[in-house]
Image: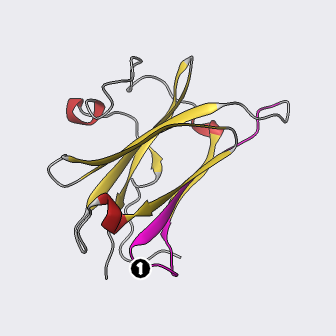
Amino acid sequence: MSIGPQDPTDWTSDATWSERERNLFPELSFDLNGPQQPAVIAYTSAYSNPAQVSTANWVLQTTRNSSGGAANYTTRAVIVNRKYEVITKLGPNDFTLGQQYSLDYARIGMQPNELYRLYYVVYTTSGLIYKGHGDIRYSR
């Protein structure tokens, strides 16, 4: 269930990233502003874990290919603060249909009531599949 104001640019495909945003992924050698395959991604979302105040889950779900099978993907993500300082990096993680991350805000070093942004890239050995961002914040 959504909590707080909604931003329609969160948890969806980003068409282009600035140089500052592309520089968050220096290890990737393909064009991060290249063509994407948004139909591959069924959904991505982040939601708080009601059992633990300072944790959340981020889920990335792909669709099956036209033959009903599942392709292999890799994901990388970076959480930054308002100054684009890297708080933590996630991945690379290989997955088939879905990938779920548990984010322990306190362990990562995030401060309560501060806004952070998670940038993510999904790719294969052929290059970019999907990229986007989502804003996150936790309250005590």
Q: Is residue 42 magenta?
A: no
Q: Nearer the viewer, residue 8 or 45?
A: 45
Residue at (46% x, 53% y) in the render: 11
Q: Is residue 16 left or right of residue 94?
A: left
Q: Quadrant of the C terminus?
A: bottom left
Give how far across and how far down residue 107 sits, in percent: 34, 63
Label 1: which secondary element: loop
Q: Is residue 61 visible?
A: no
Residue at (76% x, 33% y) in the render: 65
Give how far across and how far down residue 91 sits, in percent: 46, 39
- Residue extending furthest toward the left: 83
Residue at (27% x, 36% y) in the render: 21
Amino acid under disc 1: Val
Q: Is residue 81 left or right of residue 31?
A: left
Give how far across and how far down residue 3 sits, in percent: 42, 77
Q: Nearer the viewer, residue 11 or 114?
A: 114
Task: Provide the residue designation for mark 1.
Answer: 53
Give how far across and how far down residue 33 sits, in percent: 38, 26
Q: Is residue 71 visible?
A: yes
Q: Is residue 63 magenta?
A: yes
Picture layout, residue 35 above or below residue 117: above
- The region drawn magenta spans 47-66
Q: Which of the 4 quarters of the picture holds residue 29? A: top left
Picture layout, residue 26 above or below residue 57: above
Picture layout, residue 106 above or below residue 96: below
Q: Which of the 4 quarters of the picture holds residue 81? A: bottom left
**Colour setting:** secondary structure
